[in-house]
Amino acid sequence: MGVQHSGCRLAGHGFDGRSLGFLGMQCGFFYDAHRTEIDVDAVVALLGHRFDDGGTAMSAMMDAAMADSWFVRA
């Protein structure tokens, strides 16, 4: 489930928000939210953002998706 917010630990890269608009602002861009095409462009820009370590949000998300994990229902 790498597409979930929890799939990419943004807080570990200096981000402290969850909304797309706030995350975009932290990456240095502003956009007119809640329009499908513009929201998709913002997600693509966010996923391509380079962290200080040189990786991208997309690569971090893919690494998390490929890692072994367990889901226990009790």
Image (tube, rainbow, N blue to C red):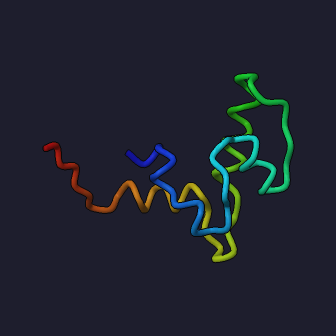
Total marks placed: 0
The quarter of the picture where residue 73 lies is top left
The quarter of the rendered structure image containing the N terminus is top left
Q: Is residue 63 above or below residue 1?
A: below
**Nearest the eye: 47 or 30:** 30
Q: Quadrant of the C terminus?
A: top left
Q: Residue at x 69, y 50 (%)?
A: 46
Classify residue 35 as left or right of residue 43.
right
Camera-side residue: 60 or 33? 33
Left or right position of 36 against 63: right
Rendering coords of residue 21 (x, y %): 75, 41
* Residue at the far front in the pictured view: 74
Instruction: Point out the residue furthest to the top here.
Output: 35
- Which residue is at 47% across, 44% downward? 4
Q: Nearer the viewer, residue 19 or 74?
A: 74
> Which residue is pictured at 67% across the width and 42% down the height?
19
In the rendered view, would you say 50 is above or below 27? below
Picture coordinates of residue 51, whole percent (x, y): 67, 68
Q: Residue furthest bottom?
A: 53
Residue ID at (56%, 55%): 58
Residue 28 in the image, given as x and y percentages of width and height: 84, 55
Q: Quadrant of residue 65?
A: bottom left
